[in-house]
Image (cartoon, rainbow, N blue to C red):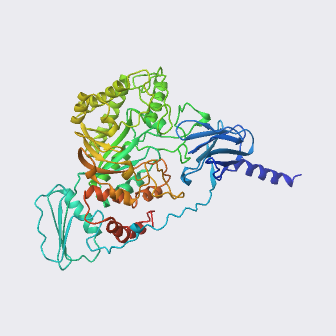
Amino acid sequence: MKRLFPIILLFLLVSCTRTPVAEWTEGQAEADGRALNTLVLQDVTKGSRVWFQELFDTKNIVEGPAINHYQGTSWYIDIPNDGTVTIKYYGRALPRHSWAPEGFVMQQRGKADKPMQVNYHFINDTTNTGIDEDFIPKYEAQSADIIPQVKRVQYGTEPLEPSESLPHGWYRITIDENGESTVESDDEDGAFYAKITLDKLPKPLQPMTIEDWPDNQYRGFMLDVARDFRPVDEVLKVIDLMAQYKFNVFHFHIGDDEAWCLEIKDLPDLTDLSGHHALPDWDLQETKALKPTANGRVGNKTYYTAEEYKQILRYAWERHIAVIPEFDAPGHSRASIKAMQAYERRTGDSDLRLQDAADTSRYWSAQDFTDNVLSVYLPSVYTFYGIVFDEVIRLHSEAEVPLLAIHIGGDEVPGGAWSDKDRHAMKDLFTNSMLELAEQRGILLAGWEDIAKGIEPATAERLKQSLYFINIWTGKGMEGFPCVLSPATNNYVDLAYSADREELGLFWAGFVDERKTYSMNPADYIGDIVGVSAHLWSEQLRCFDDVTFQMLPKALGCAERAWNTTSPGDFNQFYSIIVQREMPVWEQKGYKFKKR
């Protein structure tokens, strides 16, 4: 018996330290379009709760315990027995692998959450998309061919006649027969872009003269870090990529339903709660942290400290890139709502309340939330945003970096919100109240196109006076408003490149590749067009490789269209330059990118 004791003890120790595992098997689509999928949870504990994300659809359970929806993309299963739990359920056929359930976490009362390993068994994708002639390089890149393409080039030592007008950002490079270069520019931006161009030109430098300038003074790239947080070092790498393609505005999406990602000195609950993700002891009220994220990470810090934010500001500004922070409201506000509920519980102070407890509105947001809309009729909403605005202004001032605008979102307020109020009046109230905050502080606002729709004429006129721009993401522009072109069908680079089921991304607005971004024509839009922007939403991003894969090369079409409203060549020329000049650089730097 003494000999058996160590073996028994070892067995018990191994049993106690086993990591729970999820096995998900995709079923074949049946005649009605449904598929019988199988989820097997191994080494789980009776009485525990397993959380996961991204359940595409469930029609009915054939075998096993119930699958319960929580909020957003979060689901959970209460575990009925020790060991192995098998669940078979009918759902719609899976359109792509990245939509399969993920982010599995097992929770037990009084114990730390356990992230679970997930193994997938997908049906082989037999789709053959064929060879696309557009993506076979047929153009031999010349010495001056870079992305974005230069406006004018004269090879040899013959002089290039100067342009009559010299817009901001203009530069001229002259390279003599000895490879020596001379740069002319009327401003610091032009000198910086000349340096970027010189660094990109193949060595040794050939005799030529280049004259170049941007057609748009706003050339933006948006990164969403609320859905999938990117640490500071990765944000800086994104900024480096932006600089290489002459983007000059970093639209920083840092406040949404899923997280609040900026430390606000006078509102510590914002990041104490909404900058962390876990539900200890099954805290469905989310009193200490928000629900687990889609990638299954729990308890991690998902926000930037004030010093980290200033580091990002300075780093971007050194590369001639301004940062515009976005805190989406009055929809997309769940993270701030939950944080201020925590503040009120902690202090008893209701002066920062963002949601009226007496509001009985029922709604379902585009991202499946039922509790993410501000009660815009509460004065406390604007007390809160006044504090946020003041802190952002302070951080930009301390970093000695201009604050061009604060982006307040304004999109996708679900139908059913403010059900006992006049919806039109509520939107007008919100817009005027946010404008008052901006006017008092002498700053400009930005928003999605939605913010300029459905408001009173007087409010619209007032908005134009304090508006830097609106992002046009669904329509064709708006007369009288400064518009940044951000069409989802062309410029949402998080959308999948193609119908390949193994590829990352959504496709609610179609598929977007570098041909699609390149083809966006500003001439098709109305209004005061001030720029072009690419947008990388992060619902399906899980690592930095995903970020660069979705950016490269498709974001270069946005960079091209932002710099050159009309490009000097056709798409194959553009793509050939990418293959011959840009892809080798990405290979060298270790970036993951889309290869054909």
Where residue 502 appears, as percent x and y from the top left, is: 54, 58
**Is 171 in front, or is 456?**
456
Within the image, what quadrant is residue 393 found in? top left
Is residue 539 at least partly visible in the picture? Answer: yes
Within the image, what quadrant is residue 182 found in? bottom left
Where residue 158 appears, as percent x and y from the top left, is: 13, 76
Where residue 567 appears, as percent x and y from the top left, is: 26, 62
Where residue 254 appears, as percent x and y from the top left, is: 40, 42
Name the residue at 54% across, 38% down.
291
Left or right placement of residue 31 versus residue 268 in this view:
right
Left or right placement of residue 4 versus residue 336 in this view:
right
**Is 322 in front, or is 492?**
492
- Identify whether 340 is placed above or below 171: above
Name the residue at 24% across, 40% down.
481
- Identify whether 477 is placed above or below 248: above
Is residue 240 at least partly visible in the picture? Answer: no
Q: Quadrant of the C terminus?
A: bottom left
The residue lying furthest to the bottom in this view is 177
Name the residue at 28% across, 74% down.
142
Count the numbered circles shown: 0
The residue lying furthest to the right in this view is 1
The residue lying furthest to the front in this view is 31
